[in-house]
Image: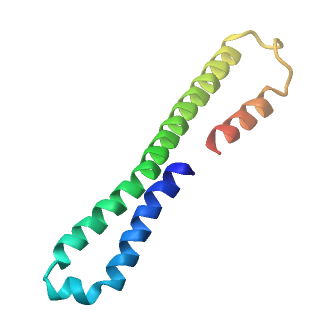
């Protein structure tokens, strides 16, 4: 939250000053410089969000891989063990585990 407040305040300040001085900016032909500065501030504000999103997606991917691995291993073990080792609820377990992995 603090990074967002710091980067957003610079962006809002620059935007407010640009709007209030729009006539002067146009008179001196500095539109491109102010536009480039605004884009730079927007990029700095969006950077932490992008990093947060990338880290979240990385974590989701790893958790899905781990879930699929555990589910596959448990299904493989249940298929190899002799009949009667597990209760009839193993299919219910597999179905429930698969539905958790998809969420």
Question: Which of the 4 quarters of the picture holds residue 76?
Answer: top right
The answer to whether residue 33 is left or right of residue 49 is: left
Image height check: is 67 above or below 2?
A: above
Picture quarter with the C terminus = top right
Identify the residue at horizontal 82%, vertical 16% (top origin). Answer: 86
Question: Which of the 4 quarters of the picture holds residue 38?
Answer: bottom left
Total labels: the figure holds 0
Identify the residue at horizontal 57%, vertical 26% (top origin). Answer: 66
Q: Position of residue 30 (x, y in %)?
A: 16, 77
Q: Position of residue 98 (x, y in %)?
A: 67, 36
Q: Position of residue 43 (x, y in %)?
A: 34, 58
Image height check: is 23 above or below 47?
A: below
- Color scheme of the displayed model: rainbow
Q: Nearer the viewer, residue 16 or 62?
A: 16
Question: Which of the 4 quarters of the picture holds residue 80?
Answer: top right
The answer to whether residue 94 is left or right of residue 65 is: right
Identify the residue at horizontal 44%, vertical 48% (top origin). Answer: 48
Identify the residue at horizontal 66%, vertical 22% (top origin). Answer: 75
């Amino acid at each position: 939250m603090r990074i967002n407040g710091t980067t957003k305040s610079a962006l809002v300040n620059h935007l407010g000053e640009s709007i209030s001085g729009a006539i002067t900016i146009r008179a001196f032909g500095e539109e491109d410089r102010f536009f480039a500065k605004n884009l730079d501030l927007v990029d700095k504000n969006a950077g932490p969000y992008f990093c947060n999103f990338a880290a979240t997606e990385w974590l989701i991917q790893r958790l899905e891989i781990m879930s699929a691995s555990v589910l596959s291993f448990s299904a493989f073990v249940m298929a190899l063990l002799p009949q009667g080792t597990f209760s009839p609820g193993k299919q219910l377990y597999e179905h429930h585990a698969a539905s958790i992995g998809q969420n």
